[in-house]
Amino acid sequence: MAKSRVQFICQACGNVTSRWAGKCEACGEWNTLVEEGTAGGIGSGPASMRSTRKGRAVVLTSLSGEIEDAPRIASGISELDRATGGGFVRGSALLVGGDPGIGKSTLLTQAAAALARQGHRIVYVSGEEAVAQIRLRAQRLGVANSSVELAAETNVEDILATIADGKRPDLVILDSIQTLWTDAAESAPGTVTQVRAAAQTLIRYAKSTGAAIVLVGHVTKEGQIAGPRVVEHMVDAVLYFEGEGGHHYRILRTVKNRFGPTDEIGVFEMSDKGLREVSNPSELFLGERHAAAPGAAVFAGIEGTRPVLVEIQALVAPTSLGTPRRAVVGWDGARLAMVLAVLEAHCGVRFGTHDVYLNVAGGYRISEPAADLAVAAALVSSLTGLALPADCVYFGEISLSGAIRPVAHAQQRLKEAEKLGFGQAVLPRGSEELGNGTGAASFQPATLTDLVVRIAGSLRRDADD
């Protein structure tokens, strides 16, 4: 009789090893290797997957042909439809991640009710809450009279057998993927093998029937969806629901979408009646702005196809420490170090005896390098104690040589700034045709030194006056 093999699978990255170790060699995490057998299912070795069954021939077809159903199901919640690229695609699998209590279940309950009111069959399956708890949430949101079908179940085979009765569902919501388990794997629920096997079974159902599947995933302390990253590669779209505990808004961010643009965002405001759409997030992020304070610059950014204006705040304070502090919230710390180095090397602005604190107002997170110019302006403004013009926006990428490089979508950024009452702009040279309005009153420095000289010149003029 063949001896059964034992393998160890990392619960953080899914790496498989033949022996236990305290640290995973693939991702570097500690105490994440869990012993799992190779008796069958996903994750088993090649020997256990051998079968004498012959392959079944599938039908080959052409690209042209009639489409039976509409390609998308629009929920009517414009911010959700924007993030998904126009609605849920039939036969697709979508993964939604977010911190506990951020509002994932609230958003999906509202979306399920909106789709049910349009006549679609919606099935909501919860592995974490009882049916009574879901009904309480629906009553609080005012959607208890919608025809959403509920179930509290964790076995994948039982779920598929249940929704197979009657008309094919248009959308199936499963909350959450970490609580589901399938008979195809012998591991405990929540392990890498079970998560991957359950996701594969559900995705296979979606592709074969044309029903859209939404999987809810927990996140780790680093903000990544818990479980193997291979699940993110298996699904068609990945959305992150973000927000800070001290702020009442939430951001639904698209990080992967096979059927639409990535880096798209939808903005919501959390209230006691659920999530409310925010059609103009720039007004939300600039709502508490103090225009006369030094160290604040308004950045005109782009999230997917949407321009967003947000305030970047900097505080440069003298320090008695041997090594000054560098603290960043909402931006890349390495990017801040680069901007500080360029300011010191090419502009003569010294930060060696100062602590530097940088914050993106409202808890918003910026990832594009176009924020370099706004960060540099905020840093110089805080160091000199001079408030920047209240009606000016900034965007542009800074190179290591001190040059300011053009960025895409300059027209969209300027139009959004003009719509919110900004009359000036500082942007790189060589940008696309600017036209009238805010673009006509723009300052286009070739290097970062030009911007520093302009800010320092304003300080000297105020002193002369």
Image (cartoon, helix red, strand yellow):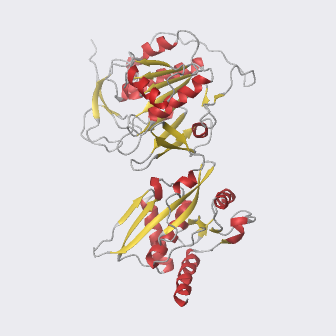
Where residue 194 sits, quadrant-wise, is top left
- Kindly give the residue lying farthest to the bottom in the view shown: 464
Question: Compared with residue 83, is residue 363 higher up or lower down, i.e. above or below?
Answer: below
Q: Nearer the viewer, residue 198 or 101?
A: 101
Point 67% across, 56% down: residue: 412
> Would residue 280 appear left or right of 96 to someone viewing this image?
right
Question: Compared with residue 250, is residue 363 higher up or lower down, i.e. above or below?
Answer: below
On the question of residue 234 being in view, the answer is no
Residue 334: x percent and y percent?
43, 61
- Total numbered labels: 0
Question: Compared with residue 103, is residue 212 higher up or lower down, i.e. above or below?
Answer: above
Q: Nearer the viewer, residue 193 or 146?
A: 146
Residue 67: x percent and y percent?
71, 22
Point 54% across, 62% down: residue: 371
Where residue 43 sits, quadrant-wise, is top left
On the question of residue 434 being in view, the answer is yes
Q: Quadrant of the C terminus?
A: bottom right
Q: Quadrant of the N terminus?
A: top left
Residue 279: x percent and y percent?
60, 46
Point 28% across, 15% down: residue: 2
Question: Compared with residue 335, is residue 222 higher up or lower down, i.e. above or below?
Answer: above
Point 54% across, 30% down: residue: 111
Residue 45: x percent and y percent?
37, 23
